[in-house]
Amino acid sequence: MQKNALNRVVTYVTVQLIITIVVSTLLILLNVTAAYSAFAGGLIATVTSTWFALKVFAARQTNEPAVELQSFYWAEINKIVLTGAMFVAAFVLIKPVNGAALLVVYFFVYITPAVVDVFKQPKRRRETKES
């Protein structure tokens, strides 16, 4: 995995975990069920995003476009299956579960890499111009 890509993955995962922990901690003040449901949702998003990133960036060592594209498709399929399995497990195993908290925090944590990219874009543009 390239160093720059690895740094981005670590940044995304770190931010996702921080958001998961902060939101879950704040929800403890309102409702314990919502807090652990939110924690489960955040972990589902973080684990599946990490799995996807590791699978995609591991194939980038080959420098063959066909292999990279194949790994991207397989990683996405695996991510969808893993996400579905984790949601089923969460709704079956967590009793009681607050579905709204789980789903809202999942979505919120899931989109954090895009938000992090928006905030890092100006910095990346400066780095590209200087190179």
Image: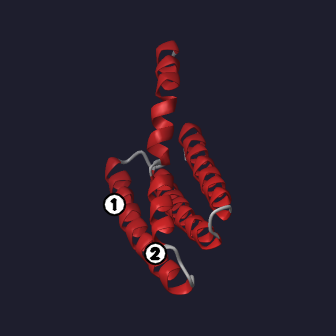
x 50%, y 67%: residue: 102
Q: Position of residue 12 (x, y in %)?
A: 56, 46
SS class, disc 1 = helix
Scheme by which the image is coloured: secondary structure
x 39%, y 59%: residue: 71
**Residue 33 marker:** none
Q: Is 115 left or right of 8, judged from the image as shown?
A: left
Q: Position of residue 100 (x, y in %)?
A: 45, 68
Q: Is 63 left or right of 27, judged from the image as shown?
A: left
Q: Nearer the viewer, mark 1 or mark 2?
A: 2
Front in this rendered view, residue 102 or 46: 102
Residue 70 position (above or below residue 61): below
Say what amino acid the circle numbered 2 marks. Answer: Phe
Return the residue at label 2: 87
Answer whether labels 1 and 2 touch (C-beta < 8 Å).
no
Residue 25 occupies which quadrant of the picture? bottom right
Total number of numbered labels? 2
SS class, disc 2 = helix
Which label's residue is closer to the chain start, 1 or 2? 1
x 50%, y 81%: residue: 89
Say what amino acid the circle numbered 1 marks. Answer: Tyr
Front in this rendered view, residue 28 or 21: 28
| 10 Å crowding of disc 2: few (<14), some (14-19), many (20+) | some
Q: Position of residue 62 (x, y in %)?
A: 45, 49
Residue 116 position (above or below residue 99): above
| 10 Å crowding of disc 1: few (<14), some (14-19), many (20+) | some
Q: CA distance from mark 1 to mark 2?
A: 21 Å
x 44%, y 70%: residue: 83
Return the residue at label 1: 73
Q: Is 90 left or right of 7, judged from the image as shown?
A: left
